Image: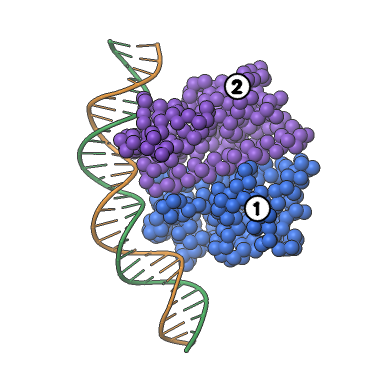
Chain colours: A blue, B purple, C green, D orange
Amino acid sequence: MHQDQARFGPSPKLLPHIQSAFAPAALQPIATVRPVRREQTIIEQNSEGDSWFCVISGAARQFTISPEGRRQIVDILLPGDFFGYGPDKHARFAVQAITDGTIVARYPGMQLDALANSDPRVARELRDRLSSTVARLQEQMLLVSTMTATEKVRAFLFYMIGRHPSGEEDTTYLPMSRYDIADQLGISVETVSRSITDLQSAGVIELAGPRTIGITGKARG
Amino acid sequence: MHQDQARFGPSPKLLPHIQSAFAPAALQPIATVRPVRREQTIIEQNSEGDSWFCVISGAARQFTISPEGRRQIVDILLPGDFFGYGPDKHARFAVQAITDGTIVARYPGMQLDALANSDPRVARELRDRLSSTVARLQEQMLLVSTMTATEKVRAFLFYMIGRHPSGEEDTTYLPMSRYDIADQLGISVETVSRSITDLQSAGVIELAGPRTIGITGKARG
DNA sequence: CGTGTATTTGAACCGCCTCAATCCCTGTGG
DNA sequence: CCACAGGGATTGAGGCGGTTCAAATACACG
């Protein structure tokens, strides 16, 4: 009786070719796929549920709103990233899509457990995905606890470029706004903007439009 | 042929009564237990290995040293917390004990996989522990991305008090130094000290010695 | 008791936040 | 095709908080 039950379409194998790129193939039998629009909520904060999710394409943010009204982003979710309810079936954080055309796969908890119990390869897959989540969070922890704002932004941009879907390109399109970057790094939007400008004039990155950034030869060499 | 292999004693069931309190009972058959002294390394940074670990008692820090020489702590590990090598068998971060008398259980990766494959309850246990790790890291992410330094410190202290082994006490002994707190929160030692002083004079906490802190009625009420 | 470490306190500087305004990019309607 | 609107991004000025450097004090351990 979860409120997200109804929102997922009845066609479990929508877009299977896209799904296979980033979602675990072993989980395909129990997956339902849903496209989400920009700013649309995937998991409501403090809601109950036991589903797990995987981003197929696009991007999503996992966050909470502090008592003072500040939005704190704890994770930027990109294709291949897992997220979901904790062991207590309670969602401490909300998740919503950042871009239009974001697609997420949903795996009902009961079915996921059943599959994991019957197939060790599935259990293994889940462990690996959770390990990756841990590694990702620790990496983002490093970004946030970095000293200077410009260094935070530089590290964040390089992290994003490194996670570019196509892999080895040295130019990528940022799916998120300056506000997202600010809320993730715990600094103000203005500082993000200033830092990006500084990095550009220092020749570390180059911009082709606000959202399209590249690593310059200076940074690579 | 991991270098930590030799350092672990030959007695797999050392201190079983302590282990049962925080380590998963299902993993006891393959566990080896080791006491670690203060500042002693449990996992070397950039080393190879596939073991997993669980803190039985004491405390440990998971960290990296930045190119500029700054120590960045990504996780404070307390009794019951899991840690280990990622899916790539590579240790991105070092782990070392914070206090004397820290005890960790070690689970060799091969045996852990075998056990998980043969017993779904073990696989389930591992998933839950990893989920807890994710939740813990996200919680710490919130601390670090908090705005003011005093608020970071307050949240950190309350987090530590909340994780007090004995549970419901409102006074606890901090196992780590001000430097650990500083490196975890990404602020300077002096600021940590000043913040603690401020919180004390504001009546939020009370100190009985530098490492023994309590929540005052003011903060509870 | 003395020694080294941990913690606290002080003073000055600088970086980041805040508030405010401008600019730019996108989409929409005339 | 242009005008306009609205959100996103950038830039500017001023104040405060946190870092840094320096020193004093408290603490733990032999």
Name the residue: 75% across, 37% down: B120
Amino acid found under the numbered disc labelled 2? Ile
Name the residue: 63% across, 32% down: B52
Q: Where is residue B216, by image quadrant?
A: top left
Q: Locate residue B52 relative to residue B100 in the image: left or right.
A: right
Residue nearer the viewer, B91 or A30: A30
Q: Residues within 10 Å of mark 1 (few under 14, many from 20)?
A: many
Residue nearer the viewer, A28 or B162: B162
Name the residue: 51% across, 49% down: A74
Judge whether residue B58 can be spotted in this image: yes
Residue nearer the viewer, A43 or A195: A43
In three-dimensional space, the C-alpha distance between marks 2 and 1, rounded to whole angstroms, equals 37 Å
A55 shown above or below B174: below
Amino acid found under the numbered disc labelled 1? Phe
Q: Are marks 2 and 1 in contact (CB under 8 Å)?
A: no
- Residue wearing tag 1: A53
Q: Position of residue A37 (x, y in %)?
A: 59, 65
Q: Secondary structure at mark 2?
A: helix
Q: Secondary structure at mark 1?
A: strand
- Residue wearing tag 2: B18
Mark in front: 2 vs 1: 2
